[in-house]
Amino acid sequence: MKLIEKTIKLPKLDREASLFLLIPSDYTTHKSFPLLIMNDGQNMFLDEKASFGTSWGLMEHFDSLPSMIIAGVSCANGLDRLDEYNPFVSKPFELDGIKRITGGKGDIYIHDLIETVIPFISSKYAIDDSNITIGGSSMGGLISVYASLTYPSIFKNAIGLSNAFWIAEDDFVKYIKRTRKLHKGMLYIDTGDSEDKDDFTYIESNRNVYEALLSKKINVVYREIPGGIHHESSWRERIKDIIIEVIK
């Protein structure tokens, strides 16, 4: 395997991001490879790059996965991350002493993925554009599920761990119930049973989103993880099996 890191400009958001590309050892231009795009890409591969010192360990898992290319796109800083990972304008949120309305830039972020990131990857590597999956955790899970529902012809599948649906639960449920787009892939969502705290209602909001998805007859798997916490160490333990389950 080979891990490549590049700086890429996201023009619609007018910021730079680190793009991490994990390329399989059997890569060849003679066939196309599934592509997995992970949000919070700085947390996916190396502990020394991860925001909180623990990565998801995708390099360690890689040889046990189906042959694919994994791309990680680094997130924006602070509350800007909540803006980009949420298509809906949400209630005020406080982080590091700053409190303000967040959200509303999710569609802009997705368009940068579609119009800039994916074309850049496909210009360098042979990807199967009919088999692209998007994934992440918390807010990164929210935007992944939204992206696949909104652009199912581009993002065939979505993987969302410990999804922070609570930040825009009502709007998200209404959006799901209004959607008329045909989704032929798979959505995977989960949350740990030890994540709820104060207004962070992970279990209830994930259950409500799951029920809305079922009502639209979408192929969705939902799990509540015993002992699951809101941390990379917990996501690291289960991501390998999830990827194997979702990406065929």
Image (spheres, rainbow, N blue to C red):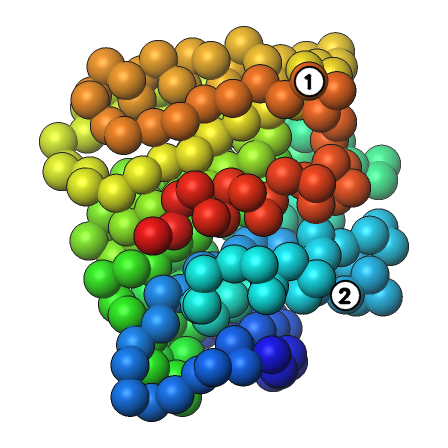
Label placed on residue 226? 1
Q: Which residue is mark 2?
A: 46
Q: Residue 123 in the image: x percent, y percent?
A: 35, 87
Secondary structure at badge 1 equals loop
Mark 2 surroundings: few (<14), some (14-19) or many (≥20) residues within 10 A:
some
Above or below, comparing residue 90 to residue 133 in the picture: above
State which quarter of the image contains the N terminus: bottom right
Residue 10 vs residue 26, the one in the foreground = 26
- Which residue corresponds to the image point at 24% horizontal and 28% vertical from the top-left? 218
Q: Is residue 80 left or right of residue 95?
A: left
Q: Is residue 164 left or right of residue 183?
A: right
The amino acid type found where label 1 is placed reads Pro
Above or below, comparing residue 211 to residue 37 in the picture: above
Residue 177 is at least partly visible in this image: yes
Circles 1 and 2 in contact, beta carbons < 8 Å: no
The amino acid type found where label 2 is placed reads Leu
Mark 1 surroundings: few (<14), some (14-19) or many (≥20) residues within 10 A:
few
Label placed on residue 3? none
Q: Residue 81 in the image: x percent, y percent?
A: 62, 49
Q: CA distance from mark 1 to mark 2?
A: 26 Å
Residue 27 vs residue 191, the one in the foreground = 27
Q: Residue 215 in the image: x percent, y percent?
A: 23, 14
- Which residue corresponds to the image point at 47% horizontal and 82% vertical from the top-left? 26
